[in-house]
Structure formats: C-alpha cells, structure tokens
Image (tube, grey):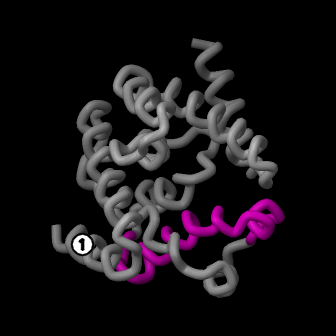
Amino acid sequence: MQKTDEIKEYAESVLSKKRFAHTVSVAEEAKRLALIWGEDSQKAYIAGLAHDIAKEIPARVALEMLENFGYEIDEAEKLNTALLHGPLAAFVAEKKFGITDSDILNAISNHTTGRPDMSLLEKIVFVADFAEPLRTYPEAARIRELAEKNLDEAVLAQADYVIKFIIDCNRTLHISTVDTRNYYLMKIKRG
C-alpha cells in the first residue's frame, strides 16, 4: 500500500489537476475491471496510477530519457511523441518506485497503442485508460459497458475507434495499434 501512496503523491506532483483526476479514475476503473475479470486488483490499481506519470514530460526530454534507458524509438513515435509517455512511464515506475513486475510494466508501457496477445492486466489498463468514467465521449461509455461482458471485444472496439480517429486527424498511426486490432478481430472470429 505504501508504493501506491508514493505513486499517487508523485503523480499529483507532476501532473495537471485534470490529468491527475484522469489518472486516479483510470486506477479505479482498472481495479473495478480487475475484480470483474479475476485479475489482481492491487496490480491493476498500481498500473492505472502509474500509466500517465510521464505524460507531461516535454517531448525532447522524453526522447532523451528513453534513449538513456536504451529504448529504441521507432519512426511513428518520432512523428507522434505523445506515444512515448507509456514506455517512459514504465521506466519511471521501475527506476523511481522499484516496480519489477513485468505484467505491471507492460500494462503501463502498452496502454496507449496496445499490442497483440496482451495479458489480462494489459487489456484492463488499455480499456480503463480509454473508458474511465471521466471520459465524456460516447465511445467511452460503450466500451466501458462492453468491457464488463467481453474484454477482447472491448479491446477490438477501442482499437477500431482509435484507428478511425487517428486517420481522421491525419496523424501517424502506430503499427502496434493496427496489430492489436487485427489480433483481437481474428481471435474473436475464431471463437
């Protein structure tokens, strides 16, 4: 519980009020979904609290930090530096708070783009970030409801929405999001 308090205090100190409120809401939603799906709710809460702790680090600083950590930045991330906050948050969680649980670190790292064959915890944090109750767009409520019934279908619906949104904004689409969508579409079709 002490680690949770430390992460929460740190998040509050480095994030805007609005981003901090979102972070706490993601942690609560992740915990709620974990209880529904039989995942460790403490791990889900920690991953939710830590998922955005690097969100407001300036892009040039984030790039430098990730390079120092040995992270290989791909072309899509260079063109859309907002994608860097997930991997960087995982490094910060590990280095600053001593989190070594690879499932928590992967959930933090992949919460924006997703990835094929995510663990249960990764899917929970991926969906919680998109659909937490403070999100006001209609798709959030739809995916929150869907996540209570079928987490894979919620991941697919979320990936579909994100892909359409990114294309409509004429921004660079990360291949992990496309791969996530295709993986879960095929998984669901196979039954």
In the rendered image, residue 175 lying in the magenta stretch gets the answer no
Q: Quadrant of the C terminus?
A: top right
Badge 1: residue crowd in 10 Å (few <14, some 14–19, many ≥20): few
Residue 183, percent across and down? 67, 31
Q: Secondary structure at mark 1?
A: helix
**Where is 153 relative to 73, above or below?**
above
Residue furthest to the left in view is 1
In terms of depth relative to the viewer, which is nearer, 23 or 43?
A: 23
Residue at 41% x, 65% y: name it.
19
Residue at 60% x, 81% y: name it.
58
Q: Quadrant of the N terminus?
A: bottom left
Question: Residue 2 is drawn in which quadrant?
Answer: bottom left
How many numbered badges does the structure rendering display? 1
| Residue type, mark 1 in image | Lys
Q: Is residue 55 left or right of residue 61?
A: left
In the rendered image, residue 90 lying in the magenta stretch gets the answer yes
Residue 146, percent across and down? 42, 24
Question: Residue 141 is drawn in which quadrant?
Answer: top left
In terms of depth relative to the viewer, which is nearer, 58 or 39?
A: 58
Residue 103, percent across and down? 44, 54
Q: Is residue 171 left or right of residue 45?
A: right
Residue at 31% x, 52% y: name it.
25
The residue identified by callout 1 is 3
Q: Main secondary structure of the magenta part?
A: helix
Q: Is residue 157 left or right of residue 78?
A: left
Whether residue 28 is visible here, answered yes or no, is yes
**Where is 75 relative to 13, above or below?**
above
Magenta-colored span: 73-99
Q: Is residue 158 left or right of residue 41?
A: right
Whether residue 179 is visible here, answered yes or no, is no
